Image: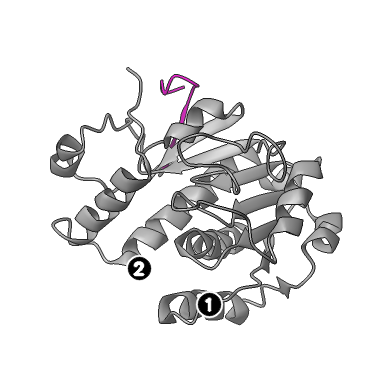
């Protein structure tokens, strides 16, 4: 059974449904999404492979997921650092950043320089709502992600990719292929262009909402918040 993908409009509608009839708050959904990402990172990059995790966060919900993931990674024993150049004035994001500051998790200003002491990268810059051109200060980040030999885990979408059409045909981001993709709630159409290890995360969709959106949700095991799937969406 191939997992159904969700385009940008359907994914946004599903989020609204979860926060409407599903009775979730955005805080809850972000916490569960970030927890899923942290578990995927632990699965593909256990602590023995290196503790330094650089998390690149954008100004929106994708960046919030990254901030949550960084907090969990800290408590797993990693040493995360955060690149968060466009901090939101939204109270939720401010609280997430404060939680990391209280743990003495460093916030860095120079992403390419921070890569020199990093073992794994979490790309939480742009999510499923991204479209158009990559604006400052993120072009340098996308170039670094294209060029690095370090493993990269992308949150929901590789940053700079079009949600339906995948990587740009040319120019910035066209050579970006992360090692790991964590699709939140359900894979997006861009997943067909992805070549690495693919996880689905988000163990919070009720059967009722799943039926409403015709989702083929994977079977999560035990306390896992993520499921690894192959390129056809089959559980591994």
Give percent across and percent down for residue 20.
17, 60
Label 1 crowd (10 A; few <14 / some 14-19 / many >=20):
some
- Measure how far apart labels 1 and 2 are at the Cα level: 14 Å
Can residue 24 be spotted in the picture? Answer: yes
Report the residue marked by disc 2: 27
Q: How many marks?
A: 2
> Which residue occupies the foreground of this view, 26 or 158?
158
User: Horizontally, is 89 left or right of 158 in the view?
Assistant: left
Task: Tell me the SS state at disc 1.
Answer: helix
Q: Disc 1 or disc 2, which is closer to the eye?
A: 2
Q: Please tell me whether residue 68 is drawn above or below residue 35 in the rendered image.
A: below
Task: Tell me the SS state at disc 2.
Answer: helix
Report the residue marked by disc 1: 99
Label 2 crowd (10 A; few <14 / some 14-19 / many >=20):
some
Residue found 42% across the figure and 54% down from its top:
33
Q: Which image quarter is the N terminus in?
A: top left
N-term-proximal mark, 1 vs 2: 2
Residue found 81% across the figure and 56% down from its top:
115
Range of residues picked out in magenta: 226-236
Q: Main secondary structure of the magenta part?
A: loop
- Per the image, is 86 magenta? no
Give percent across and percent down for residue 130.
50, 53
- The image quarter containing residue 213 is top left
User: Horizontally, is 133 left or right of 50 in the view?
Assistant: left
Q: Which mark is residue 145?
A: none
- Per the image, is 227 magenta? yes
Residue found 27% across the figure and 29% down from its top:
216
């Amino acid at each position: 059974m191939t997992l159904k993908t969700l385009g940008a409009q359907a994914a946004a509608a599903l989020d609204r449904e979860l926060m409407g009839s599903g009775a979730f708050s955005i805080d809850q959904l972000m916490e569960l999404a970030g927890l899923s990402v942290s578990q995927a990172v632990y699965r593909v990059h256990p602590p023995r492979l290196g503790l330094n995790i650089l998390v690149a966060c954008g100004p929106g919900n994708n960046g919030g997921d990254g901030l949550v993931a960084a907090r969990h990674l800290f408590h797993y024993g990693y040493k995360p650092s955060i690149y968060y150049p466009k901090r939101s004035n939204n109270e939720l994001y401010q609280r997430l950043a404060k939680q990391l500051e209280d743990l003495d998790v460093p916030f860095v200003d120079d992403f390419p320089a921070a890569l020199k002491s990093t073992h794994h990268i979490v790309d939480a810059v742009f999510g499923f709502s991204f479209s158009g051109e990559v604006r400052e200060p993120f072009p340098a980040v996308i170039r670094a992600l294209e060029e690095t030999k370090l493993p990269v885990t992308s949150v929901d979408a590789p940053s700079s990719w079009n949600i339906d059409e995948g990587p740009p045909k040319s120019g910035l981001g066209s050579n970006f292929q992360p090692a790991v993709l964590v699709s939140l709630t359900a894979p997006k159409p861009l997943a067909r262009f992805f070549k690495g290890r693919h996880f689905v995360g988000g163990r919070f969709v009720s059967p009722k909402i799943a039926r409403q959106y015709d989702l083929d949700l994977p079977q999560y095991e035990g306390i896992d918040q993520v499921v690894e799937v192959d390129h056809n969406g089959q559980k591994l």
